[in-house]
Image (tube, rainbow, N blue to C red):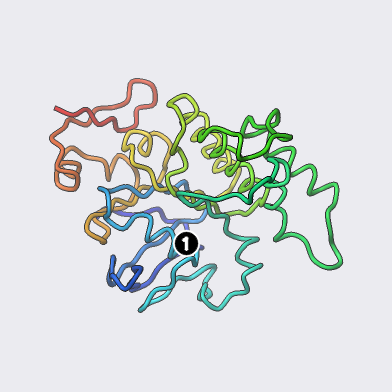
Amino acid sequence: MTTTLTTPARLSAHDATIGYDGRVVSEHLDVEIPTGSFTVIVGPNACGKSTLLRALARLIRPTAGEVLLDGDAIAKLPTKQIARTLGMLPQTSIAPDGIRVSDLVARGRHPHQTILRQWSREDQSAVAAALAATGTTELAGRLVDELSGGQRQRVWVAMLLAQDAPTMLLDEPTTFLDIAHQYDLLRLFHRLHAEGRTVVAVLHDLNQAARFADHIIMMRDGQVVAYGAPADVVTAERVEEVFGLACSVIPDPHTGTPLVVPR
């Protein structure tokens, strides 16, 4: 197993057994998400990537072991405290019928409001900035139901940005997007990471993962096979071992990051 980053982890799973519907997906799982990293979880279909992400977000609870957030058991923390710290974009999201884009994005501000602190200029500015960052400002007055799949995905990302959580968990965030919008979105997440946020994403595209992440977790059959810097994790031998794909791994001509070329 490769070496991970030396930055302390604010989010981690320790000896965790996780699954759903009575089925165990991972046992005795140990994972650390370095603070300030752009971590991408990769692996074959049904290897446990999304299940791990959901456990880190407290959407499912380990039947053994624990998930820690800033050293505290996440299961014991108040929900609103978690919502101000972690933002989660699931694979599929369902908007209420008849809701407009601006109102959906505004829901990202709920964790910051209290009985004494209702809607403010700060909230309005956060919503406007989130719409601008995702290229959805012109959609603000439209009904979410009227949007294409790609537009809806960008609106959900805008709601996550409006939440302004320091750690963002993204389950296949490029789903429904064409290749240009995929890279636009990944550049946005990379910029947020550069500004100090911790970003954790599940991606299927190894080359996208290697280009944008500074920390990769590779999984197979519910277990972590390797973790660390992309150049250490994405090797021809490991890609063939984990994905069953014979390939060469060469430097990307634009970034120098690992580029998987199938044989």
Q: Is residue 114 left or right of residue 179?
A: right
Quarter of the figure that contains the N terminus: bottom left
What amino acid type is highlighted by mark number 1? Ala
Quarter of the figure that contains the C terminus: top left
Q: Residue furthest front?
A: 97
Compared with 62, 194 (above or below) is: above
| Position in image of residue 170 (x %, y %) | 48, 49
Q: Which element carries disc 1, helix, strand or loop?
A: strand
Compared with 148, 225 (above or below) is: below
Query: In this orientation, does residue 198 appear?
Result: no
| Position in image of residue 232 (x %, y %) | 27, 44
Q: Is residue 55 left or right of residue 36?
A: left
| Position in image of residue 189 (x %, y %) | 53, 39
Please identify the quarter of the rendering in which residue 245 is found: top left
Residue situated in front as seen by the camera: 153 or 100: 100
Query: In this orientation, does residue 49 appear?
Result: yes
| Position in image of residue 178 (x %, y %) | 44, 27
At x 13%, y 35%, the residue is 246
At x 55%, y 78%, the residue is 76
Graded by Cα atoms within 10 Å as few (under 14), some (14 to 19) or many (20 or more), the crowding at tag 1 reads some
Q: Is residue 191 left or right of residue 112?
A: left
At x 61%, y 60%, the residue is 85
Compared with 45, 31 (above or below) is: below
Please identify the quarter of the rendering in which residue 222 is found: bottom left
At x 72%, y 48%, the residue is 106
Residue bearing the label numbered 1: 9
Q: How many marks?
A: 1
Residue situated in front as seen by the camera: 90 or 247: 90
